[in-house]
Image (spheres, rainbow, N blue to C red):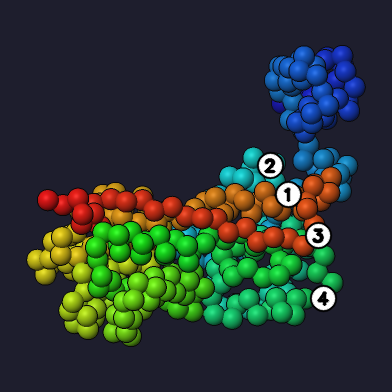
Amino acid sequence: MIKHKRPNIKQVALAAGVSTQTVSRVMNDRPDVSPETRERVQKIIGDLGYQPSALARSLIQQRSYTLGVVTAGLKYIGPARTLSGITNAAEEFGYSLLLKELPRFDVTHVLPILQEFISHHADGVIWAVPEVGDNREWLNQPPADLEVPMVFLTMQPRENIPVVSIDNYQGGRMAMSHLLDQGYRHIGHISGPLDWWEARQRKAAWQDALQENNIEVRESYWVEGNWSSASGAQAIEKLFQQYPEMDAVFAANDQMALSVIQAAYQRNKRIPQDIGVVGFDNISESPFFCPALTTVQSEQYTVGRMAVEEMIKIIEPGKKQEQESDHPTPIMLTPTLVVRQSSLKQQVH
């Protein structure tokens, strides 16, 4: 069997008539290379089929080019979308991932998890577990001598901790402002599980919007779900019983909003004439609900991408100096409202 020897960086440099340092600059997309030289080196790399050694790069630059990712609840759309963003961004930056999916959201004994990443020489850890219950309490007394950088996702901003999240409260306000502008005044709410920070933010937006418009808020005007369509079905039946005047529903996610549409149809209620419906997340099926669902577009994929970008700023040489201060500023992404037929009461003739 004939074994073909892999081309190395010295062969690329010799063929291109440049130094190995110049080849390295081209491979790392450094700006200090002329366009002509960059094009010539890239052509030689392609012709020779040169593939840089990840191990050699790690040894030279004293980094593993590996990121640890802790997640949970990948059966939910939000965490799954976030992980997709992390994966794609890491690949673009040339980093591998070590993935740890927790069995539950409420895991608080985190030291063994972090030690495992450290033992694999991870350059940083992205904590992508949503904030649920007291699963962030360990940040009040973080493990001692923890030298691995961390970026946190989907949690309430905290001082001096890098956080990337969606402004769930603002998204809820967008949904409520739209319903109020359409003339709805008896707006019920199906919340997510209230041990989730995201669910509490969306419910607070519903309540504040009503109170600011001098609309009474009662306990009977909302019901807690658990993000599933089945829980939404139970919740909307309770709301129909408890709140007979209800003319609109803000559901904390699209799966529960689907149940509202089905329940309205079963009761011969017209959407949006008799009852308006707005969801949250803009899942891919939302345009195909009947009628198509108005919903809040939450950029979970972008949250994942930005988490990787923030981590790169921390661990890449020279990037720390680009930060304005040593105290990280939380990043809160503003969602957008996607208006469809389920809430357009004013346009129904």
Along the polypeptide, which appears first: circle 1 or circle 4? 4
- Amino acid type of the residue that numbered disc 1 sits on in the rendered structure: Ile
Disc on res. 326: 3
Residue 10: tell me if it is visible: no
Asked if the residues shown at circle 4 and circle 3 are in contact, with their CB atoms under 8 angstroms apart, the answer is: no
For numbered disc 3, what is the local secondary structure?
A: loop
Disc on res. 312: 1
| Point 74% across, 57% down: residue | 124
Q: How crowded is mark 4: few (under 14 residues within 10 Å), some or many (20 or more)?
A: few
Read off the residue under disc 2.
93
Q: Is residue 320 above or below residue 209?
A: above
- Amino acid type of the residue that numbered disc 3 sits on in the rendered structure: Asp
Along the polypeptide, which appears first: circle 4 or circle 3? 4
Asked if the residues shown at circle 3 and circle 1 are in contact, with their CB atoms under 8 angstroms apart, the answer is: no
For marks 2 and 3, give the CA distance.
23 Å
Left/right placement of residue 310 relative to residue 6 reads left
For marks 3 and 1, give the CA distance.
15 Å
> Closest to the observer: 28 or 334?
334
| Point 48% across, 66% down: residue | 169
Q: Is residue 338 above or below residue 151?
A: above
For marks 1 and 2, give the CA distance.
8 Å
Residue 201: tell me if it is visible: yes
